[in-house]
């Protein structure tokens, strides 16, 4: 990459940087171009706000909340539990009861969308 991203593990920042470099100054992009645009896959350590993708150990991947009181002892949600609508709905309702704020819930939803759209490495 030509520019360094300040927070190297910020998934969305990395994807935006890749997109900018791919566009290379073009202001108009066709639908076919969008389909062929390179995408980066989520990697171990990627962040969405206070949520971090944890792929270690590989047989137990999780999305970890590291905000507020959880920095030294992350609150883990196993990724297989987020692969169904029922599981996702359960966790969204459960997290909504916590006092972590709207931004945290938005970051959680963005993380799940990005991780499930472009499968994490196994």
Image (spheres, rainbow, N blue to C red):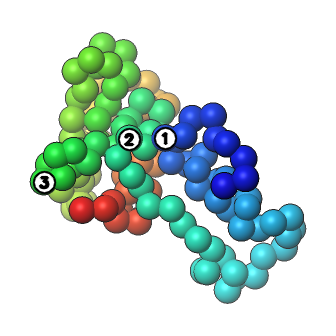
Q: Tell which of 57 and 103 is nearer to you.
A: 57
Residue at numbered disc 2: 45
Q: Is residue 51 left or right of residue 40?
A: left
What element does badge 3 sit on? loop
Q: Tell which of 107 and 52 is nearer to you.
A: 52
In 3D space, how far apart are the residues under numbered discs 3 and 2 (Cα atoms)? 16 Å
What element does badge 2 sit on? loop
| Mark 2 surroundings: few (<14), some (14-19) or many (≥20) residues within 10 A | some
Tell whether label 1 touches label 2 (CB within 8 Å). Answer: yes
Q: Which mark is residue 118?
A: none
Residue 95: where, in percent of width, then height? 28, 33
Tell whether label 3 touches label 1 (CB within 8 Å). Answer: no
Q: Residue at x 69, y 81 (%)?
A: 33
Q: Which mark is residue 9?
A: 1
Residue 17: where, in percent of width, then height? 67, 53
Residue 31: where, in percent of width, then height? 69, 82
């Amino acid at each position: 990459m030509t520019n360094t991203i300040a927070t190297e593990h910020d998934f969305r920042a990395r994807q935006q940087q890749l997109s900018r470099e791919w566009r290379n100054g073009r202001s108009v992009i066709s639908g076919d171009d969008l389909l062929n645009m390179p995408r980066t896959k989520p990697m171990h350590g990627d962040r969405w706000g206070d949520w971090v993708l944890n792929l270690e150990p590989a047989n137990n991947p999780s999305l970890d909340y590291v905000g507020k009181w959880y920095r030294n002892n992350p609150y883990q949600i196993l990724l297989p539990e987020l692969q169904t609508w029922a599981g996702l709905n359960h966790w969204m309702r459960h997290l909504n009861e916590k006092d972590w704020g709207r931004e945290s819930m938005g970051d959680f939803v963005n993380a799940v969308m990005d991780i499930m759209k472009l499968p994490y490495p196994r």
